[in-house]
Amino acid sequence: LLTLKSILGFLESYFHGSSSGVDPLISYTQKTLLFTPEEVTETPLSTDLLSLFQTVDSGQRRNTEALVKDFKSRLSDSNFKSQMEILAHHNLQAIEAMISGNPSEVQNHFYQISKLQYTHLNHLITESLQSDWKKGLDTGLNLFKICGAGGGGYFFNLIIEQKKTNYSIRFQKHQFCNSLTDNGKRLTAYRRRLTACRSSTWLTPVRQANRI
């Protein structure tokens, strides 16, 4: 899998600069994978836990390469860097909670991730999600997380309420697509119904009842 990851990363780099190969590997294998510097392993997750998540299409394009460059430049600020280290800690703990199948711990760490991103990475949250993101933090029932570089594309949504809200007409094709990262450890889960998560990303969000 590591070799295949490198090959697919090389191919994807043609489209938006340097690629880790993670996204195309997930799309190709259609598996839940745990990434460490030494290996890539399949790591099945609880279906009950996965049912708490959905992806949200922001309906906005983004320039991944420019956003990543900006993020790296911000790390020169010691305060910002320390907050990102705290964020990485909660990411790692959320990964462990996902693997162990502990929904309450997933919720606790996901809340902290969402709060830290809203506070320190707010410029990467689209205007269309600002209000719902803040409301989710106030109630703890509908939490969001930046996917990848943020600033557009898809966002990740943890629903604590019984009834889900579908923000994208494309959600009927994207049952689950998530990635939680830490320095050296990354868990990416992917379930596909009809199409890959990367396809047809830029449709305008449409709220509708969950069809899944």
Image: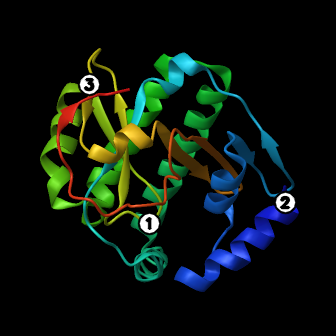
Give the structural element (helix, strand or loop) at label 1.
loop
Q: Is residue 56 left or right of residue 194?
A: left
**Precedes in sequence: disc 3 or disc 1:** 3
Question: Where does the image place residue 41, in percent across and percent down from the top left?
Answer: 81, 43
Mark 2 lies on residue: 2
Question: Where does the image place residue 198, in percent across and percent down from the top left?
Answer: 49, 59
Residue at (26%, 56%) from the top-left corner?
Answer: 58
**Residue 166 placement: quadrant:** top left
Q: Is residue 154 above or below residue 74?
A: above
The colour style of the image is rainbow
Q: Is residue 87 left or right of residue 168?
A: right
Mark 3 lies on residue: 141
Q: Nearer the viewer, residue 51 or 70?
A: 51
Mark 1 lies on residue: 149
Mark 3–mark 1 distance (CA, rounded to whole Å): 24 Å
Give the structural element (helix, strand or loop) at label 3.
loop
